[in-house]
Amino acid sequence: MGRGSKPKAGLARFSVSDLLIPGYQRFWELSVGRPHNIASPLDIMLEVPIGLAVFNNQFGRPCIMGYFRTLITTVGHRNVKEIRGYHKPIMLAGSLGTVRPVHAIKEAGMIELGAYLIVLGGPAMLIGLGGGAASSITSGEGSVDLDFAPV
């Protein structure tokens, strides 16, 4: 139930394919294309952190830790080459907080079997809501909204 917990700081981690910034493409970046219904890594990195910042600021906590990684590379063994990278982006979000021990253990019978679960939130809180559904299908199989919702 989250009784008495106090959020302190946010954590964010992003892994996407090479950004390919127009006019600033780096020599190590590979352009391998992508399905039309998947957001580009650059679009993701321009939009997603804003949603994460809004989510963190709703609780008044700063985002103090994380990483940002881009990767597309070619690997090979005996004339067989593969291109690997984060074609389907990965975002991990979390937080750090405190809770008093008396509030950490839930009371027996506090939630009854069959109770309704209510999910509150807006666009910044799509993290995890679309993720399960989107990660269970092949990239590009669902709608564009579903591909973008988990990130």
Image (cartoon, helix red, strand yellow):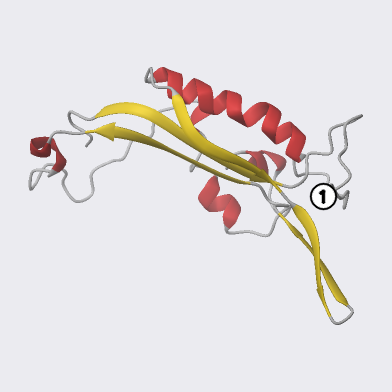
Mark 1 secondary-structure assignment: loop
Q: What x and y, as percent, mark residue 145?
A: 66, 38
Residue 72: in sight, yes or no? yes
Q: Quadrant of residue 36?
A: top right
* Residue 120 spot, x, y in % from top left: 39, 29
Residue at the far front: name it: 27
Q: Quadrant of residue 83?
A: bottom right
Give the residue at x 74% y 32%.
Answer: 43
- Label 1 crowd (10 A; few <14 / some 14-19 / many >=20): few
For badge 1, the amino acid type reads Pro
Q: Quadrant of residue 82?
A: bottom right
Q: From the viewer's perspective, is residue 65 above or below residue 69?
A: above
Front in this rendered view, residue 52 or 72? 72
Read off the residue under disc 1: 35
- Residue at 19% x, 51% y is 113
Q: Is residue 148 above or below residue 140?
A: above
Residue 96 vs residue 102, the one in the foreground: 96
Identify whether 97 is placed above or below 33. Answer: above
Answer with left or right where residue 101 lies relative to residue 46.
Answer: left
Q: Which residue: 71% across, 41% down?
A: 144
Quadrant position of the N terminus in the picture: top left
